[in-house]
Image: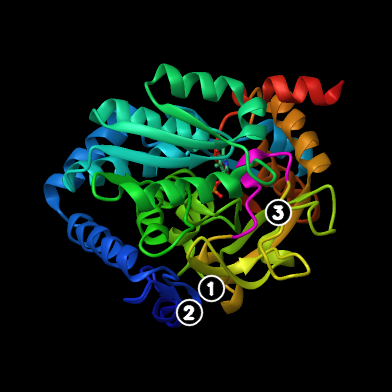
Amino acid sequence: MNTNLQKTINILPDNEGFFGEYGGQFLDEKLKKEFKKIADAFLALKDDKDFNEELNYLLKHYVGRPSALYFAKNLSNKYGARIYLKREDLNHTGAHKINHSLGEALLAKRLGKKKIIAETGAGQHGVATATAAALMGLECDVYMGEVDIQKEKPNVDKMKILGANVISVKDGKKTLKEAVDAAFNAYLKEYDTAIYAIGSVVGPHPFPMIVEHFQSVIGKEARKQFLELTNTLPDCVIACVGGGSNAIGLFDAFLDDKEVNIYGVEPLGKGTKTGDNAASLTYGKNGIIHGFKCKLLQDENGSPANAYSIASGLDYPGVGPKHCYLQSLGRANYVTVSDEQAIQAFFELSKTEGIIPALESSHAVAYAIEYAKQNPDKKILVNLSGRGDKDVDFIINYMK
Ligand SMILES: *Cc1c(COP(=O)(O)O)cnc(C)c1O
């Protein structure tokens, strides 16, 4: 254990919500006051026995946790390293997002709110939020870009079946960034009765902290499972990074294990040109979006650039502040994988292991394969953030 790192890397942000220079609350005072209430409620509840009993009961019996840690034998034999998959794809609703959605919905209940307002890209956060809202008897408004609505029809249908209102956002590129803007504006009008349930470790304080806390179950389980299975720690851990919630949920448990290399995989999309990718940590510059400071993809004027990835859940021009901080400390490495490499990995995992990954998760798998080829004797832990059912129609059309 490296105690130095333990001291430098904060699990929680400072009082203003900063991880190093990233994060914070770039908001008007009215909203800051409202968010302070959410932050205070969360900080009191996160160690509350009743709250955690209720959450843990649901994680076990409703979500199906702990999710399996699977040694991908065929993939490992083919590429030489030992590749282990943390199976978040096996969760109820098919991805990691249910972990924080349940936490956020429980928080909403404790705060006496009647409605959850959310945004969604791939539709996964929308489905997870609609699911949690149905379970808790809360109303649910989900804002979603028109382009994503067309691309992710099965998830849109699910949200409607679950009783959520899906609100189509027709501004700009009509994808995740605009959906976040719209959800934010709606929340500004309804914060007395509603809570904003963000879909990743992004947005103003306290949301990155809240989502990170609820997602940290991934790494806690995975580290323990890995030790049980192999008696050692992995040489590296790999996760895809959109906003960064599944990644930080895995990484947190390994931050103090200096011997474990950490890789976050960003989407290179079609290439390095602005507008062709969503690799904020790789190509972004410090900037502010949706009330927080992060590495941000920007156009010539310094405005948030259009972000693109074949994986809807990854196409956000900003990224979680803790990732920016970990990158600045050199504790985590951020690399990129293109659309094409992700699609290859999508088929590779499907054909070698019988597991169809989400296109988002395929980015992590693609990097794991590259890493395995170059480091044949290493043990690799990959977070399989979600299943690919939602992407099947899109992939079939894309291949034509
Ligand atoms: C939303 C999503 C992601 C990206 O979100 P993060 O906050 O970066 O984890 C990754 N994988 C799947 C399956 C998703 O649905």
Residue 383 sits in quarter? top right
Q: Determine which of the numbered discs, if any, sits on residue 48 in the image.
A: none
Quadrant containing the C terminus is top right
Of all residues, the one furthest to the front in this rendering is 189
Q: From which residue to which does the magenta span run? A: 309-318
Any part of residue 358 in sight? no
* Numbered badge on residue 20: 2
Is 379 covered by the magenta stretch? no
Q: Name the residue under label 1.
A: 325
Q: In which quarter of the image is ligand 1?
A: top right
Looking at the image, tell me whether mark 2 or mark 3 is earlier in sequence order.
2
> In the image, is the residue at mark 1 within 8 Å of ligand 1 by its beta carbon?
no
Mark 3: secondary structure: loop
User: Label 3 sits on what residue type?
Assistant: Ala
Q: Do the residues labelled 3 and 1 touch (CB within 8 Å)?
A: no
In the rendered structure, find residue 278 and report the number of the disc placed on it.
Answer: 3
Q: Is mark 2 on a helix, strand or loop?
A: loop
Q: Is residue 312 magenta?
A: yes
